[in-house]
Every structure is written in C-alpha cells, then in structure tokens.
C-alpha cells in the first residue's frame, strides 16, 4: 500500500499542479532523488550535503535489523518489558507515533518536570530498559535523564550496563561515554538530521524494544520511495508544492487533522518537522495540532486519512518519508534551508548562561492573582488575570497566532481523584478541569486566530524554532509552576526543577529580545493555579 495525496479544493489543486509543473521544469524531482545539496541555495549547500541520508533510509536501515533483533531478544529474555525512551524532539517524536499506532506501551521522557520524571522512575524499575537517544549526544535534558536513571538503577542494586541502551551518531560525546560505561551503542546514520530520522536507528530501536514491527515500517516506506523520483504521480512533490505555494500565497497555518486515521499522533511528529524546517528568516509554516479550523483564509487543513483541504492517506512508514520529502520541497519553494534550526540554539545558550550565573533572575511579578504570579511587560498595570488574557488576545496581529507553552507535569491531571463509580464522561470532565490543555480550548473560543499549545521543554525542540525564527506574528503565554519535589541531576550543579525554570526564562529572553509579546504565569500552587487559570478564561 502506498501514499495518496488528494486535493479536496479546486483552488488548492490548481495551485499545487502549477507549482509541481514549475518544480519539474527545474528538474527538482530528479535532483532530489539524486541527493543534490544545491537545491536550497548557496547558504544551505554545506548543511544539505550532510543531511539527505533520509532519502535512502528505507533501504539502508534494513542493515540495522539483525542488531536490533538481538537486542530485543536479550531484553525479552531478561523480562525487561518497561521501555523508557529518553530523547528530545526528533529523538523521541517518531517512536512515540510508531508505538501509539502499534498499540505497544512506551514511556517517553522528554520533560524536565521533576514530578513527571519521578513518576517514570517510580514505575517498575526492576523491569525497565532505558533507551538514551541523542544525535548530538549533548542535549541537556537527555544527559540529565541518563544521569538520573544511572543513579536510580544503582540505588536499586541494578547494574546500569544491563539496562541502558544508547542510540547516537558516530563520534558523539555520548558514544564515547557509553563505550566507557559498557552500554550497548547503536549508531545512526550521521547524514540525517534529527527531525528526518524517523526511519533511522532513532525511530527503530526504541520502537522495536517496545514491540512494534519496524520491518513493516521500512517495507511501507520502501514501497513509496520509487514514486519520489517521478515527475508525475509523486505524492511528496505534490504535497510539498501545495504546502510551499499555499504558504507563499499567505495560507501559512497548517492545521493537522487525524480523527479518522488509524495512525495515532502523527500530527505531533509533523509539527516538529514542518515548524523547525520552515520557521526561519521571518518566514515559515505554522503547524497547528488539535484545534478546530476557523475557516480563516490563512488556514490549510491537512487530513491524515481524514477530511481536509488535502488528504494524505497511507501507512505510517510511507507517511514519514512523504512528509519529509514534502517538507524539503516546501523549503525550496519558500527559499529557506529546511535542514538547520538556527534559533533553537539561542534559547539553549540562554538557559546555559542562566544556570551558570547562580540565582535565576525570575523578576518581580506585574501582578498576583491568587495562586498565579504574572510576569511580563504586557501585564504591567493589569488588575487581574482576566485583563491579562484580554490584553494578550487583543495583541494577536491580524494574521497571527497565540502560543501557550506549559512547563508542568503533563500527566498530573490524570491524578485527580475520581469516584470509583464515576462514568467515563465524569472522569474526562474531572481530568479536563485539572488540565492546563483546557486553557487552549477556552482561549481559542475568544479569538478567530489559531491558539497552539506546547509542553515545555518538548516544544523548544519543535515549534520553538518557528516562534523565534518565523514571522513577527506570535503572542506567547508561558506557564511555569512551583515544584513540591525536585530531583538532583547527579554530577551537575542543578536540579531538574532549576533546569526547567531556566529553560522557560531562557526562551522568554529570546522572545522578548525580538519584541514578541510574552507573559509568564507562575503557579505558586500548581493545582489551584490551573483551576484559577481556567476559571479566569471562562469569565472572559
Ligand atoms: O538528538 P539530539 O541531538 O539530542 O537533539 C534533539 C533535538 O534537539 C534540538 O533542539 C534540535 O532542534 C532538534 O531538531 C533535535 O531533534
């Protein structure tokens, strides 16, 4: 089974056809099939030269299968059935979709929230295998998780060497330290960037350990690969031409819809691919996940096996490859380098500087509304949270968006007590009344502009690039919270809680430097704080 791209709007079909013809006349399909790094201009040439390996992964990754098979056998024989994946962005988003789609459990650790990490640590340590996945080998969150798990294993009387598996690029500092520690290391193709690595060792190793059929994934990708060299009937070229040409014409909000799909959670993976690849040089496509369309003229709805302006149907392995191809094409149409992420680094550097400077400069609140402290110039003089929300909604520019970025425990809402005899509906009501994600729906009711939602620091490796590198059209709402418990990062002078706050402040610094309206809401009591946010948003 292959991938089909169907345009459900005549105007979009025409635009896509016209752009596809132009690309074909320039020989783009042949050049990309041949791995030509000159397709994105001179400035992108050097990066593209070492970033096109994903085109061949459906074939080259097959070589990994015997090694992965042995690892799976060993962990099964040892009864290690709780698979934890420590990895950020491209090093965890694909396995998350693969495992959700295959309906096999995988615990993804891409948070610095102490409570959320503590929950993973407290879960079946005696049966846990941890995959530490980092292409660069230097990502602070993943490095922290490795250190924390090493200590937890030792404290439980378990040798970490039997429980930690490393996936990284050859020559990374993580490869070196893993060899010294005696961990099995699976090396990934270094000519593939993080967000294009779904079909590399980064996608395959954790998914196979969790029980997914990764060979099928490669088969499905291999089946669509020949189409990607064609001038006609090339789903990647058509999709990329449509996304790029629509965005260039002002339809640059990409709503991702997957309600009819048997693939679970692909929009989260596409979000990173599209936002980090295109959101730069004040241009880009903003992916919007989990929101209802507003029928605005800057929106384009892409449905995964679902209704939309364009419908993309097909199995997961093939979808990965087609979306990667389409994103590279959209980058060409928009005139940007789809393989770098220049502004992600800036927030990371800010965070590093804050951590080494001592006391974190969290500032003085502009106002305090019950359990919520409000920081930021946009909140000065406001009398309460309702006024803060109102001001921010008004500050969204005509073709702009609001982004809510939440540095909290994303699973906390599920801990709220519910009666034993509660119906499913009562349960979901109780959860949503405790979930910061509900704030998005409430604020989205009050504006016809898209409201996006990201969990920090996960989104920093995804939409964070677009927030800072994309157009000057975003309004930003950060949510942080007091930590009741905290976790030391062994061998480092900071705790997870301190790192978490430094990440929020580091990103805030990068946004404020660009004069992008940013307010931080700090919950001095998390549960009461979330309740207050939702109450205020209901009163708007
Ligand atoms: O795999 P790693 O090197 O740890 O990188 C994980 C993530 O970090 C960075 O922030 C990049 O912007 C992402 O594209 C990448 O996927």
Image (cartoon, rainbow, N blue to C red):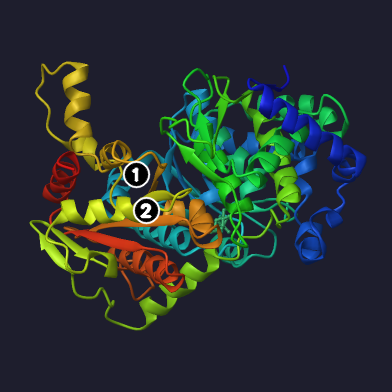
Dot 2 falls on a residue whose secondary structure is: helix
Whole-Å distance between the Cαs marked 2 and 1?
7 Å
Instruction: Count residues near mark 2 (Cα–Cα under 10 Å), then give few for <14, some for 14-19, many for 20+.
Output: many
Q: Residue 40, position in %: x, y?
A: 79, 56
The mark found on residue 153 in the picture is 2
**Residue pictured at 48% horizontal, 68% vertical:** 348
Choose between 254 and 229: the one closer to the eye: 254
Q: Is mark 1 within 8 Å of ligand 1?
A: no
**Residue pictured at 74% horizontal, 28% vertical:** 14
The answer to whether any part of residue 343 appears in the image is yes
Q: In which quarter of the image is residue 417?
A: top left
Please, which residue is most extreme toward the bottom here? 357
How many numbered discs?
A: 2
Q: Residue 235, position in %: x, y?
A: 75, 28
Instruction: Count residues near mark 1 (Cα–Cα under 10 Å), then give few for <14, some for 14-19, many for 20+.
Output: some
Vertical arrangement, residue 83 with respect to residue 8, above or below: below
Classify the position of the C terminus by image quarter.
Answer: top left
Q: Name the residue under label 1.
A: 125
Which one is earlier in the sequence, the residue at label 2 or at label 1?
1
The answer to whether any part of residue 206 appears in the image is no
Left or right of 207 on screen, residue 366: left
Choose between 191 and 302: the one closer to the eye: 302
The answer to whether the residue labelled 2 contacts the one labelled 1, judged by CB atoms less than 8 Å apart, is yes
Q: Residue 296, position in %: x, y?
A: 48, 35
Dot 1 falls on a residue whose secondary structure is: helix
Q: In which quarter of the image is residue 304?
A: top right
Left or right of 519 on screen, residue 334: right
The mark found on residue 146 in the picture is none
Q: Does the residue labelled 2 lie within 8 Å of ligand 1?
A: no
Classify the position of the N terminus by image quarter.
Answer: top right
Choose between 238 and 151: the one closer to the eye: 238
């Amino acid at each position: 089974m292959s991938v089909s791209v169907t345009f459900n709007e005549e105007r979009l079909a025409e635009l896509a056809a016209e752009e596809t013809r132009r690309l074909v006349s320039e020989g783009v399909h042949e050049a990309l099939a041949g791995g030509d790094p000159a397709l994105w201009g001179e400035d992108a040439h050097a990066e593209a030269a070492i970033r096109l390996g994903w085109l061949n992964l459906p074939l080259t990754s097959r070589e990994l299968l015997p090694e992965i098979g042995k690892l799976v056998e060993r962990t099964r024989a040892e009864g290690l059935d709780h698979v934890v994946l420590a990895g950020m962005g491209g090093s965890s988003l694909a396995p998350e979709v693969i495992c959700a789609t295959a309906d096999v459990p995988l615990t993804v650790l891409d948070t610095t929230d102490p409570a959320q990490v503590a929950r993973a640590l407290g879960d079946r340590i005696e049966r846990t295998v941890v995959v530490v996945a980092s292409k660069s080998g230097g990502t602070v969150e993943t490095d922290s998780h490795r250190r924390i798990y090493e200590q937890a294993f030792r404290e439980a009387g378990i040798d970490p060497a039997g429980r930690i598996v490393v996936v990284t690029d050859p020559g990374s500092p993580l490869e070196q330290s893993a060899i010294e520690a005696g961990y099995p290391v699976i090396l990934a193709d270094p000519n593939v960037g993080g967000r294009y690595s779904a079909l590399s060792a980064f996608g395959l190793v954790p998914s196979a350990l969790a029980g997914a059929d990764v060979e099928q994934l490669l088969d499905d990708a291999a089946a669509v690969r020949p189409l990607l060299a064609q001038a006609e009937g090339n789903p990647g070229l058509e999709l990329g031409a449509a996304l790029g040409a629509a965005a260039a014409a002002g339809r640059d909000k990409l709503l991702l819809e997957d309600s009819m799909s048997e693939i679970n959670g692909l929009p989260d993976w596409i979000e990173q691919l599209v936002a980090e690849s295109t959101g730069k040089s004040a241009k880009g496509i903003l992916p919007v996940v989990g929101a209802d369309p507003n029928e605005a003229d800057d929106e384009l709805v892409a449905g995964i096996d679902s209704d939309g302006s364009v419908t993309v149907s097909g199995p997961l392995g093939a979808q990965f490859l087609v979306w990667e191809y389409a994103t590279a094409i959209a980058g060409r149409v928009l005139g940007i380098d789809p393989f770098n992420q220049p502004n992600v680094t800036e927030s990371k550097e800010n965070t590093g500087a804050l951590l080494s400077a001592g006391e974190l400069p969290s500032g003085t609140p502009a106002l305090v509304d019950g359990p919520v402290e409000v920081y930021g110039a946009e909140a000065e003089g406001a009398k309460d949270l309702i006024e803060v929300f109102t001001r921010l909604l008004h500050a969204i520019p005509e073709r702009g968006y609001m982004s809510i970025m939440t540095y909290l425990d994303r699973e906390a809402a599920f801990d709220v007590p519910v009666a034993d005899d509660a119906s499913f509906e009562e349960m979901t009501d109780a959860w949503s009344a405790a979930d910061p994600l509900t704030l998005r729906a409430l604020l989205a009711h009050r504006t016809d502009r898209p409201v996006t939602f990201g969990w920090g620091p996960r989104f920093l490796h995804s939409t964070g690039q677009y927030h800072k590198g994309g157009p000057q059209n975003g309004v930003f709402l950060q949510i942080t919270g007091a930590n009741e418990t905290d976790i030391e990062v062994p061998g480092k002078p900071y705790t997870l809680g301190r790192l978490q706050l430094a990440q929020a402040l580091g990103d805030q610094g990068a946004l404020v430097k660009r004069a992008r309206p940013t307010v931080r809401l700090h919950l001095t009591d998390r549960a009461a704080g979330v309740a207050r946010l939702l109450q205020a948003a209901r009163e708007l």
